Amino acid sequence: MQGVIKRLAAPMLVWMLALSGCAKEEAAKNGVKGDEKEGKAVTIGVTQIIQHPSLDAAFNGFKKAVEDGGFKEGENVKYNVQNAQGDMNNNQTIANNFVSDEVDLIFANSTPSAQSALNATKEIPIVFTSVTDPVGAGLVPSMDKSGENITGTTDSHPDAIRKTIQFIDEQTDAKTVGLIYNAGEQNSVAQIEKVKDAAKNTDLKFVETSVSTTAEVKQAAESLVGKADVFYIVTDNTVVSAIESVVSVANEKKIPVFAGELDSLKRGCFAAYGFDYYDIGYQAGEMAVAILKGEKKPSEIKPEYPSKLKLVINKQAAEKQGIKLKPEWDQMAEYIE
């Protein structure tokens, strides 16, 4: 009898293993591994190029959306949070480690973070945010089509740069705009090109300087004193991380600072057309939830732009940077103190 049982049990075991393998393979095709289907905790690898308020806000928004989607930290989701400290080599190492650890999803919070993640894996789902030009960065074919295992939200509203240049041209006496950025950041190079393109029908001129580290930012700002009438700081990770250095020079020399995102206003910039990074992080988190639940594959979720855009002016910064507020701005902008 035992021999009969053994003969029956062996093929039954093979069949059960095959069935289990098929189930996990099917789950993987839907953007997740088999563990999620079985209700086990998922692991999200979080990679961020550097720490600054905008990126931190995006991550907070992402976590909130994931929580609202039913994934509670410490219960059914774990976060492996890594910061590259501005080092591109660290960036790639972080992504490679996530692949080795077989995380269930990668949240890439910046352009270089997303590029490194995609370079490391074509299988693990990747959701990005805080990426200025997803197409130019090689992450997605177009804003109407995601990559095979990657999708996300951009931090570039189609009208933000155009409206900023229009404001500088029509609402200030500036003739020359000073640009400070890291030429090693593809997202920044793309923005600088858009800035110049937006100014083609104006008389504005540009002076620019490039930095590679946050330690170089103040000297870069000082080098433009006497040349630039205003500063325009796009969403460059390196410069935004040290925006106080630009603001200190601007306050001393009475040079208005226009920012590419709203969080820099709290740190002393004068004005920005922007949106809340928390919101685009939340949008990205909603994508992650759909992927983790197996409802959609990354390839089935189109990349998204920010849903809102507004002009915000910092009154205190205006005073420090020698700007007299105009009555007509009351209808155009929100004010912060």
Image (cartoon, rainbow, N blue to C red):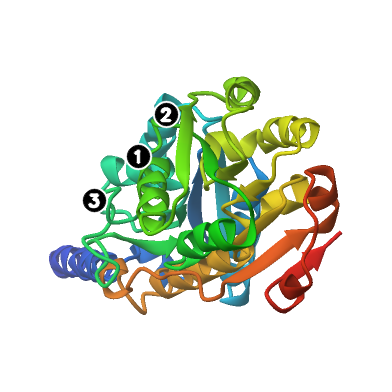
Can residue 206 be seen in this snapshot?
Answer: yes
Q: Is residue 325 left or right of residue 52?
A: right
Q: Is residue 95 left or right of residue 221?
A: left
Type of residue at label 3? Lys
Type of residue at label 2? Met
Provide the secondary structure element on which disc 3 rests: loop
Q: CA gap, disc 3 to disc 1?
A: 11 Å
Q: Which residue is mark 2?
A: 88
Q: How many numbered marks are there?
A: 3
Can residue 63 be seen in this snapshot?
Answer: no
Where is residue 264 shown, x and y percent of the image?
A: 68, 49
Q: CA gap, disc 2 to disc 3?
A: 20 Å
Q: Residue at x 32, y 54 (%)?
A: 124
Instruction: Choose the circle earlier in sequence order: 1 or 2.
Output: 2
Q: Residues within 10 Å of mark 1 (few under 14, many from 20)?
A: many
Q: Which residue is mark 3?
A: 122
Q: CA gap, disc 1 to disc 2?
A: 9 Å
Instruction: Choose the circle earlier in sequence order: 2 or 3.
Output: 2
Q: Which residue is mark 1?
A: 116
Q: Are marks 1 and 2 in contact (CB under 8 Å)?
A: yes
